[in-house]
Amino acid sequence: MALKSLRPCRHPGCPELTREGYCPKHKPKPAARRASAEHHAWYGLDIWTDDLRPAQLLREPFCRECAKHGERVRATVVDHVKPHRGDWALFVDTANHQSLCKHHHDQKTAREQAEERRKMARI
């Protein structure tokens, strides 16, 4: 297989020639993985996809937040009332599950993430 031709490093002003996009000095570092990456995979487990999620949507088929406003909107997301943050017991606790529509789930998640960022900024 033929090698790629040498080209200047993509970093502005760097004259180094490379076959990659950047020379070793300017090669971007891989992005740090979020702490939630490990337990985010739990949502793909059979216990979630085959048991917990469908059971919750059968128990509570309409969005809990919409119901507070007198609306009946079909729930599509099973949310953790209290974020589990990698706590398996909290993840599988059915008392910690609620049914929400995507709109209300996205709002709740955005609020929680903003609060988490505020906490981290104070540290």
Image (cartoon, rainbow, N blue to C red):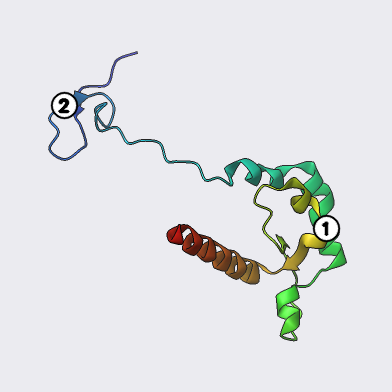
Residue name at image x 24 percent, y 29 percent: 25
Counting from the top left corner in percent of width and height, residue 15 is at: 12, 30
Q: Is 104 on the left or on the right of 1, as rendered?
A: right
Kindly check if marks 2 and 1 are in contact, taking CB atoms under 8 A apart as contact.
no
> Which percent across, then down, holds residue 2?
30, 14
Q: Quadrant of residue 57?
A: bottom right
Q: Nearer the viewer, residue 88 or 56?
A: 88
Kind of residue at badge 1: Thr
Q: Earlier in the sequence, mark 2 or mark 1?
A: 2
Which quarter of the picture shows residue 16?
A: top left
> In this figure, which residue is indicated by the disc labeled 1?
94
Q: Secondary structure at mark 2?
A: loop
**Mark 2 to mark 1: distance in Å?**
58 Å
Label 1 neighbourhood size at 10 Å, few (<14), some (14-19), many (20+)? some
Q: Amino acid at mark 2?
A: Glu
Residue placed farthest to the front in the image? 123
Residue occupying the point 74% across, 46% down: 88
Of the numbered discs in the image, which one, if any, rests on residue 16? 2
